[in-house]
Image: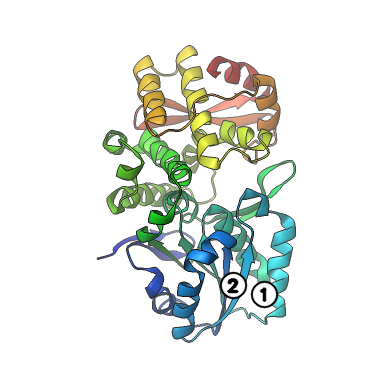
């Protein structure tokens, strides 16, 4: 039995959470898209696991399927691959009524979504997340992007999908490190909006359940509906991310996104205690939670290095960066921070 979370943003769509959904992808997509062709975008790892199954389901629903496969990893989320993908769509004759289907994690989803947003000024877009991180975070809300050498997600667009199918059976094939990546985002949701959710988390296996995923999607749905364009409340979803993206960039993306976000959350909460923004109990519970999930809380990079990398963050507006600061478990606030204060803030959290 599948659960459905309805999202009403600039486009209204369902996030379907259940099991066995890969086999049903064709009929479920056909219910929302009447086009004749689909561009199925995936990476080499996911293709080997689910590519044939999904392609057969799409073909059975009457679609002509054109598959585009990229190497796995953040290194593939580039402008070069974006241009290759939209050129592939053009070569295969995809029309404005057709759609791009992202089968994979956040890298595939971000790349595919940006291509769908810009090819022919916008075609259909469907998300089939296969990682816990993509299921609870990147597949919902319409942020699409590729990376530039100067920073992560600097070239992108807001573009909502027509449908998200979250097949929880796919999590069985995830390496533990990849599962933990998604757990970092789940911990984030508990910190910013739901103390009860935070209290339910014990280990990676306890997090990868339909009920936990649904709650995270509901939180993101509510935030996105209130602030789709990231001008206010949606910034709360960046808890740990401004520092985390800097850690990712400095590591040359050798550190996974979830691990980098975990480090970012740890730095922010330690700094927040030292600067009087939150209490020691909040810090201790968050640090203990991050460690319980096998995620890192420290980095070898200096405050100066991190502050410089944070200057390239897409969320910087002139001379200020909106830092997301914990008040207590389940509640964070937005604090406008001058860029010349970033180094001292980060230093307080190292």
Identify which residue, 86 or 66, lies in the foreground: 66
Label 1: state its secondary structure: helix
Q: Position of residue 161 (x, y in %)?
A: 50, 64
Please indicate whether residue 77 sits to the left or right of residue 99 in the image.
right
Q: Mark 1 or 2, which is nearer the eye?
A: 1
Compared with 13, 281 (above or below) is: above
Compared with 205, 135 (above or below) is: below
Please indicate whether residue 181 sits to the left or right of residue 72 in the image.
left
**Is residue 160 at all visible to an observer of this figure?**
no
Judging from the image, the colouring scheme is rainbow
Residue on which the image places disc 2: 123
Q: Position of residue 343 (x, y in %)?
A: 65, 19
Point out the tag, 1 or 2, that comes first from the N-terminus.
1
Q: Position of residue 34 (x, y in %)?
A: 49, 82
**Is residue 2 at all visible to an observer of this figure?**
yes
Residue on which the image places disc 1: 89
Disc sitting over residue 49 in the figure: none
Circles 1 and 2: CB distance less than 8 Å? yes
Residue 159 falls in image quadrant: bottom right
């Amino acid at each position: 039995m599948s659960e459905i979370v309805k999202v009403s943003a600039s486009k209204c769509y369902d996030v379907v959470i259940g099991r066995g959904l890969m086999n049903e992808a064709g009929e479920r997509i056909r219910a929302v898209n009447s086009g004749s062709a689909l561009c199925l975008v995936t990476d080499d790892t996911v293709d080997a696991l689910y590519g044939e199954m999904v392609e057969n389901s799409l073909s059975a629903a009457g679609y002509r399927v054109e598959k585009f496969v990229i190497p796995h990893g953040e290194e593939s989320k580039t402008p070069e691959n974006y241009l290759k993908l939209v050129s592939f769509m053009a070569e295969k004759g995809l029309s404005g009524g057709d759609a791009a289907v992202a089968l994979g994690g956040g890298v595939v989803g971000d790349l595919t979504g940006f291509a769908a947003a810009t090819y022919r000024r916008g075609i259909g877009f469907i998300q089939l997340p296969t990682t816990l991180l993509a299921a609870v975070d990147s597949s919902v809300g319409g942020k699409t992007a590729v990376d530039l050498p100067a920073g992560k997600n600097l070239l992108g667009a807001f573009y909502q999908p027509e449908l998200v199918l979250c097949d929880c059976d796919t999590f069985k094939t995830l390496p533990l490190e990849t599962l933990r990546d998604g757990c970092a985002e789940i911990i984030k949701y508990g910190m910013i909006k739901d103390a009860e959710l935070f209290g339910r988390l014990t280990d990676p296996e306890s997090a990868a359940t339909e009920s936990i995923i649904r709650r995270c999607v509901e939180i993101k749905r509510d935030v996105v509906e209130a602030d789709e364009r990231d001008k206010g409340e949606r910034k709360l979803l960046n808890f740990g991310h401004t520092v985390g993206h800097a850690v990712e960039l400095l590591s040359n993306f050798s550190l996974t996104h979830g691990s980098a976000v975990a480090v970012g959350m740890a730095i922010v909460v330690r700094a927040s205690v030292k600067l009087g923004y939150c209490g020691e109990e909040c810090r201790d519970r968050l640090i203990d939670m991050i460690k319980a999930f096998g995620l890192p809380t420290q980095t070898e990079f200096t405050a100066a290095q991190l502050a410089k990398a944070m200057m390239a963050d897409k969320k910087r507006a002139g001379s200020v960066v909106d830092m997301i600061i914990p008040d207590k478990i389940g509640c964070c606030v937005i604090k406008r921070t001058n860029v010349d204060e970033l180094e001292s803030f980060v230093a307080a959290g190292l």
